[in-house]
Amino acid sequence: MSRPSHHRRTALAAAAVLSLAIAPIAAAGPANAHAAPDTSKVSVGYMTQWGVYSGYYTKNLVTSGAVHKLTEIDYAFSNIAPDGTCASADAWADWQKPIDGANSVDGTSDTWTQPVAGNFHQLQELKKAYPDLKIVMSVGGWSESTNFSAAAATPESRAKFAQSCIDMYINGNLPGVAPGAAAGIFDGIAIDWEYPNEVGNGNPHGPQDTHNFTLLLAELRKQLDAAGAAAGGKHYLLTADTPSGAEKVSKIEVGPISKIVDWMNVMTFDFNGPWETTGPTESQSNLFPSPFDPAPRPTRSNPYPDNGEISVAEVVANYLAHGASPRKIAVSIPFYAHGWTGVAPGPHNDGLFQSATGVAADVNYNQIAAQPGTVHHDPFSRAAYKYDPATKTYWTFDDPQSIRDKVLFIKALGLRGDMTWSLEGDTADGQLVNAFGLAQ
C-alpha cells in the first residue's frame, strides 16, 4: 500500500512491543487442574455437514493436502433436540447419503446395505488412512444453539445432555442403526454455544447461563473421562468455541472453563462485517489495533461501545487477564470474506476506513481472486483486504501472509494453536491451510 516505509517499521516495532506486553500475562497463566500441561500445538479445521451438497467432501481434505497440516477436524454441527439431547441436524448428510467412489476417501462407493454411509463413513475412512488425526463433533453453532440454555439449566438436564452426546457420538449409537455402528469415529466433543446469556440467533437466554455453561462443560468432562476409562484409558477431547467480543466474554467464566476444557477455540473473526451496513470499512480479523481506526475505543464509562475497536491481540490479552492459560487458547482464522460496496478510495486509494453505501454478499477465500481489485496488507493491523476503485468494492479476509503473521504471534505467546471456519473456503491446493498449519 502507499504509506511511507517508515510507517511499516513503526508498525512492526509496535507489534513487537504489544507482544512483549502480553507475554508476562501469558507466562502467569494457571495450570490445568486435570492433567499435566500439554503444550502440543493444534491446528483445527472445521468441516461442515452441508458441504456434500455443494461438492465439498471429506476427500477434499486429502486432495488439497489439508490432512497433512491439521491435527484435528471439527465436524459441524450436531443439533440439540427440544428435550435437551444431542440429535443430528441432518441424518442424510451425516450417515445416510451414499458417497460414490469418485468422491470417497478410499475410492470405493458406499452401498445401500452398509450401516453407516455419508460423511460419517468418509470420516471413518479418513481416520483409517491418517490414524493420528483427531475428529471431534461440534455441538451447536449459530443455528443450533436454541436449546443450550435449557439443556444446561439443572444437574439432571446437564447429565442427560452429556450422556446423550456421548452415547451418540462416542459410543456410536445412531438412531435406526445397529448399536455401536458409528463407534470410533469421534475423539471428543466441542461445545459451540452462541452465546451464553446472549440472544444469538434469537435464542432463549438469561444470566444463569454464565455459570451453567461452566457446569455443563464440567459434566461433559466428567462423563468423557468415565467413557475414556471404560475404553482402556483413552482421553476424549473436550473443547469450547468461545466469543471474542469483550461483552460476550464477560458472560462466561473464562478461568474456570480453561481448567476444564482441553483448550478454547476463541472465535477471533467477524470483528466487523455487513451488519455495519454503512461501514466504515475495517478488518474482520485484524491481528493488532491500528492507530487510524475510527472505531470507538472502550472506556471506563463505556467498556463495550457499539462496533468498538477490537483485535486478535486484545482478545487474547483479555482472555489471559481473565485467568486463561495461554496453552488453552487457540486463535481462530476465517477462510471467507466480508465486503462493502459504494466505498470511496480514501486518502491512500485503498478504501480502508471509509464509509459505504451497501454490503456485498460474503464469499469464500477461494472466490477472492476472481473479485476485481488490488490486495493490500495494513502494516499496522497486519490485516489483508482488497479494494477495487472501479467498482468501489472493499473485501476483508485473511490470506497466507496475514495468517503467517498470526502463526508467529501464536508461537511467540505460547498459545495452543489455531482454528478455522471453514475448510471449504480454501483453494483446491490448500493455500490457506498450508500457512495455517504452520502452528503444528
Image (cartoon, grey):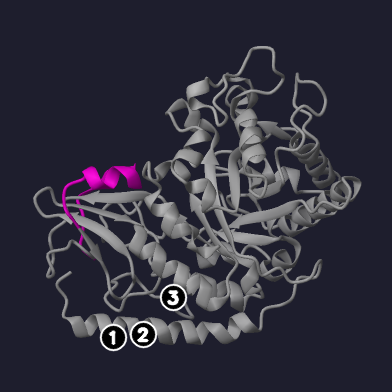
Q: Marks 3 and 1, Cα distance to the nearest angstrom?
A: 24 Å
User: Which disc number belongs to residue 10?
Assistant: 1
List x then y, in percent, for residue 107.
Answer: 54, 26
Q: Quadrant of the N terminus?
A: bottom left
Measured from the top left, where is residue 346 in percent x and y?
13, 65
On screen, residue 231 versus residue 338, left or right, reads right
- Is the Cβ of the residue at disc 3 closer than 8 Å to that at disc 1? no
Kind of residue indicated by mark 3: Pro
Q: Which contiguous range is marked in magenta?
A: 353-374
Mark 3, secondary structure of its residue: loop
Q: Who is closer to the viewer here, 143 or 389? A: 389
Query: Residue 358 location in percent, x, y?
Result: 23, 47
Observer-nearest residue: 170 or 291? 170
Out of 434 and 24, give the one closest to the viewer: 434
- CA gap, disc 2 and disc 1: 6 Å
- The amino acid type found where label 1 is placed reads Thr
- In 3D space, how far apart are the residues under numbered discs 3 and 2 (Cα atoms)? 20 Å
Q: Residue 260 appears in which quarter of the rendering?
A: bottom right
